Amino acid sequence: MMLGGHSTGPERFGTPIFGVSEVSGLICDLLDDARLRRIWVRGEVTNYKNHASGHRYFSLSERNGRSSAVINCVMWRTSASTLAFAPKDGMDVLAWGSVEVYEPHGRYQLIVREMLPAGLGERHLMVERWKQELDEEGLFDPGRKRPLPLFPQRIGVVTSPTGAAVKDILSVISRRYPADVILSPTAVQGEGAHVEIAEALRRIDGLVDVIIVGRGGGSFEDLFAFNHPDVVRAVAACRTPVISAVGHEVDTALCDFAADLRAPTPSAAAERAVPERREVLRELAGCEERMRLLVHSRLAASQSEVEDLRERMRPGRLARRINERMQRLAEHDDLLRRAAVARVQRERSALAELRASLAGQNPLAILERGYCIVEAGGRVVRSAASLAPGERVTIRMMDGRAVAVVEETTYDEDL
Amino acid sequence: MTKTFEEKLEELRGIVRKLEDGDTSLEESIAIYERGALLVKQCEDLLGTAEMKLTELGRDR
């Protein structure tokens, strides 16, 4: 092959020669395109083979008049296990997956992750569109969710009057809590079910404290009405809080997203809707017990306080206290009296002393020592000059008087 | 309008709290205890005697 012997690479007559892996790599690059990844492809199933390994090999084909197109498909065992139907040749399906190159066989193929019968598949796509649309309207906003009443008196149930859901709900509620159940009956599947469900919701809204809307589990088709925007909008428009319970654990419907609470089953919805009577009774009993204990201890405290006061008011005790006071009063009286007597005595002796000292001052005391007082005309005579001879005077002595007549008066020169 | 079950239960809880805080007078304690006991009775009666009732709405409304 290397006739030219050029150093730039193998070629023949001026055209470069590629290795198979190089070409395959180029093809891989070309097919590595977002437009070929995670896409829905619609076509007719042909050459369907369910391999012993569990992988499914088939083709999807499309005919337009004379022209036709085919793409090889493979669905690995793990993806195939989720198939909700048995694909057969000739079936119109929607397959979801990505185009990949399988280099060892030089093939490109669609690796299918999910596959649905075309009618059903289209419905799935429709639900996806609705979901996006309703989400954009804000109907699934978590901020719209309202709390459920704790002790509802009336429970509205929007479901089929003949289905298992209503039986389950009634059995749970009757076991747990004595609420009134108002059934707003509706078809839950089939043509026009969505209109009926929406109407049943509007009929019951405002008449009850909480609404349960739903049905037991079923196929995607069976639950389809609960995806319908009419139902979702009716749920979102309810003034009464709504619990949505459509199907079983794995199923969800769009109306679940718009409800205030989503329950996996109708029974679970009923459990969320009402409290357990026994628990509430237990709480009541607890309240009563606590109240009783509190009031009893309060009463006991008051009683012992009264008891204490009564003890302190007993008559014997009172008399003792009166005696005590009387005694103290008597003591004080005595003290007072003694103080008064002492005072009088003190005053008396002070008086005697005073009298004694006063006695020393008595002018008549000199008479005892032999002096006399001469009086004339009732007045004490102090001067000889005040007397005239022949004048009568009275001489007062210690023990009496004498009347005398003045013979003559003389003067003491030196006086 | 009579109180709902929920309101009664809430009032009852309030009474227990009030009795617990001990600031209320003895007279008031006894009065609210009597009120509480009545509420317990009413709540228990509601729960104990009532049974689930089922009504069906007409479809043509």
Image (cartoon, grey):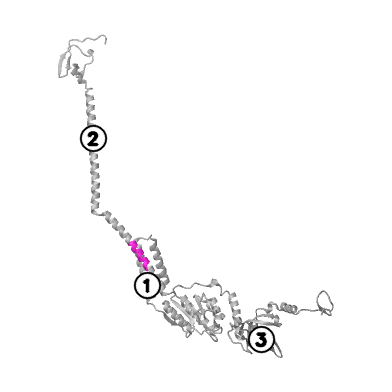
Instruction: Quadrant for residue A88, please give it.
Output: bottom right
Q: Would you name the residue on which mark 1 appears?
A: B42
Q: Are marks 1 and 2 on the same chain?
A: no
Find the residue positioned furthest to the top: A413
Q: Secondary structure at mark 2?
A: helix
Amino acid type of the residue tagged 3 in the rendering: Leu
- The chain that hosts pointer 1 is B
**CA neighbours of label 3 inside 10 A, class few (<14), some (14 to 19), many (20+):** many
Residue A166 pos. (x, y %): 47, 82
Q: Secondary structure at mark 1?
A: helix
- The chain that hosts pointer 2 is A
Q: Is residue A101 above or below residue B7?
A: below
- The answer to whether residue A17 is visible is yes
Q: Residue at x 35, y 60 (%)?
A: B25
Q: Does the magenta portion include A297?
A: yes
**CA neighbours of label 2 inside 10 A, class few (<14), some (14 to 19), many (20+):** few
Specify which label sits upstream in the sequence, 3 or 2.
3
Q: Is residue A208 above or below residue A43?
A: above
Q: Is residue A36 above or below residue B9?
A: below
Whole-number angstrom distance, CA of label 3 to CA of label 1: 71 Å
- The chain that hosts pointer 3 is A
Labels 3, 2: front one: 3
| Magenta segment boundaries in residue numbering | A288-299
Q: Would you name the residue on which mark 3 appears?
A: A60
